[in-house]
Amino acid sequence: MCIILVMDNDNAIGRGGELLCNLPEDMKHFRETTAGSVVIMGRKTWESFPKRPLPNRENIVLSRSVKELDGAEVFADVESVLEHVQNSDKRVFVIGGAEVYRQLAPYCDEALITRVYENFGGDVFFEDIERDRGWRLAESSALVETGCRKIRFFRYVRV
Ligand SMILES: NC(=O)c1ccc[n+]([C@@H]2O[C@H](COP(=O)([O-])OP(=O)(O)OC[C@H]3O[C@@H](n4cnc5c(N)ncnc54)[C@H](OP(=O)(O)O)[C@@H]3O)[C@@H](O)[C@H]2O)c1
C-alpha cells in the first residue's frame, strides 16, 4: 500500500477539518496517480470532500459511527480493511487523514509526499518522514509553482 499526502514545512496536513490550501498541480498529481485504484480514508476526510465519492476509484471509508455510505464501502476496523484489500489486483492508496495515516503507515511500503514550502499553522500532522530511519528518499521532483505557492514531489520507500 502507498501513502499519498501533502504537508507543509511543519509536517502539518490539515486545519479545521480541511486541507491547508488549494494546490492545483498537487490535485492533478493526486487525481492522475490514484485513478483506477483503491483509496482508503477516514470518515472525516470523506466528509471533507465537496463531491463524494471520488470518481473512478474504489472508495473505502473507515468509521465506527457510520455503517453505510452512498458510493463507498465502510469498514469498522483496520483489520477488516487490510483483509479486504489484501487480494485486490488494483493499487491501494491510503489518502488520509492523520488518524488513518498513523494506523496504516506501518502497512505501507511507499509514501508519495508533496511538500508545500509554507507554514499554515495546521492542527493535524504526519510524522517527520525526513528524519524517520524507517523511510528512504527514492525520488524528488524539480520545484513546481502552483497557485502562488512552491511545492515539490517526493517518493519515499520503506528501508
Ligand atoms: N494533506 C493531505 O494530504 C490530507 C489528506 C487527507 C486529509 N487531510 C486532512 O486531515 C484532516 C482529517 O484527519 P483526521 O485525523 O482528523 O480524520 P480522518 O483520519 O480523516 O478520520 C478519522 C475518523 O476515521 C474513523 N476511524 C479512524 N480510525 C478508525 C479505525 N481504526 N476503525 C474505524 N474507524 C476509524 C473514525 O470515524 P468515526 O468518528 O465515524 O468513527 C475517525 O473519527 C482534515 O483536515 C483533512 O483535510 C489532509
Image (cartoon, rainbow, N blue to C red):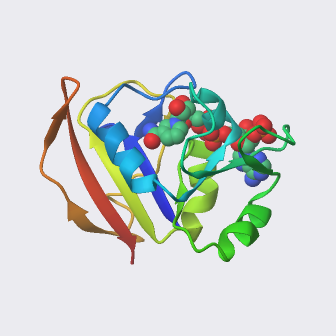
Farthest residue to the left: give it: 142
Residue 134's place in the image compared with 121, above or below, is below
Corner quadrant of residue 24: top left
Residue 131's place in the image compared with 158, above or below, is above
Image region (quadrant) for ligand 1? top right
Q: Nearer the viewer, residue 108 or 28?
A: 28
Farthest residue to the front: give it: 56
Q: From the viewer's perspective, tell me whether residue 40 is left or right of residue 150.
A: right
Quadrant assignment for the C terminus? bottom left
Instruction: Kindly identify the residue that appears in the image at 84 percent across and 41 percent down.
Output: 68
Instruction: Kindly identify the residue that appears in the image at 46 percent across and 29 percent down.
Output: 19
Q: From the viewer's perspective, tell me whether residue 80 is left or right of residue 30.
A: right
Residue 10 pos. (x, y %): 35, 37
Q: Nearer the viewer, residue 74 or 139?
A: 74
Residue 47's place in the image compared with 125, above or below, is above
Q: From the viewer's perspective, tell me whether residue 69 is left or right of residue 155.
A: right
Residue 13 pos. (x, y %): 45, 37
Corner quadrant of residue 71: top right
Corner quadrant of residue 116: top left
Q: Nearer the viewer, residue 49 or 133?
A: 49
Residue 98 pos. (x, y %): 56, 43
Instruction: Kindly identify the residue that appears in the image at 84 percent across and 44 percent down.
Output: 64
In this rendering, the count of numbered labels is 0
Residue 80 pos. (x, y %): 79, 64
